[in-house]
Amino acid sequence: MNGLTTALATPFVNGKICYRSLEKLLDFQILHDVTSFVVAGTTGESTLLSHREKINLLRFCRSRLDGCTLIAGISSPSTDQAVKQAVYATAEGADALLVSPPYYSKCTEEGYVRHIESICKCTSLPVILYNVPSRSGYCLTLRQIGGCRKFPNVTHVKQCVNVEKAKQLSVDGIDVLCGDDALLPQYIESLSAKGAISVISNLFPTLTAQVMNGKHSDVYQNCVNLLAKEVNPTMIKYLLYKVGLISSPEVRLPLTLPDEKLQKEADEFIAFSGGVM
């Protein structure tokens, strides 16, 4: 899981997953040397996918990603449902699990640790904790992350908090992955992050890898700024559509397409950047 991982968007056409577009997106990623992927994560609209769709996505990606690392997104406010997702992801050939914190219902401090323990007991796969306060409504604590250290398959934590907070939550034996493209340069420079799970790399895999290696890029920063103007993954899907990597920018309700102003900004950005990198 170290290095660059692309958090794959899930293409839709007329309400259904478009596997032709997904195959094109995967081919593009492989062509640009990306070998690690999150399927059915936040960028893949995980909470808007049915259980069967998640299984089919994993099965499809596994059949086309021989030799690559396939990380399955596990997201549910229910521990029982999260465990079921983990069992099926294991059976479908996932290499690791990215486990979102229980959302809406939230959890007690002990409850989070027991949530992760329940998942770890049902699989031998590596487990990546996911600290994303903007989505879950709360920030994991040092005690919670530290409590998960005792489970052998908890190997990484994807952090979507500022660098100083991530440092405060650092636990020996659990590697840090940057989960916020806007913070990637800081994570690499100041936190010695082991890798990144990136949205932007759907469109700019080579450029994102260069940023991870310390190369500044105006195009990357401009993309960060653009994506921040609307809820993920609406903007990245629109950009992927405009450059021809997916056949529709469609998202599922309650998400909607970017408004005309943002679409115009996106079109101007593509013209400025010269397309994919």
Image (cartoon, helix red, strand yellow):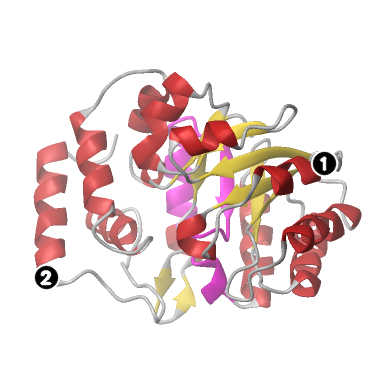
Who's the residue at 41% across and 47% down the image?
A: 199
Question: Viewer-nearest of labels 2 and 1?
Answer: 1
Tell me the number on the disc at residue 187. none
Q: Which region of the structure is painted magenta?
A: 22-49
Q: Mark 2 points at which residue?
A: 260
Who's the residue at 34% across and 44% down the image?
A: 203
Who's the residue at 43% across and 50% down the image?
A: 25
Who's the residue at 57% across and 34% down the image?
A: 168
Q: How many labels does the image show?
A: 2
Name the image quarter holding the N terminus.
top right
Q: Quadrant of the rendered structure where residue 194 is?
A: top right
* Left or right side of 230 for 118: right
Q: Mark 1 points at which residue?
A: 153
Q: In this view, does 128 lie above or below 170?
A: below
Q: Camera-side residue: 62 or 233?
A: 233
Secondary structure of the residue carrying numbered label 1: loop
Give the x, y percent position of residue 62. Answer: 67, 51
Label 2 environment density (alpha carbons within 10 Å; few <14, some 14–19, many ≥20): few
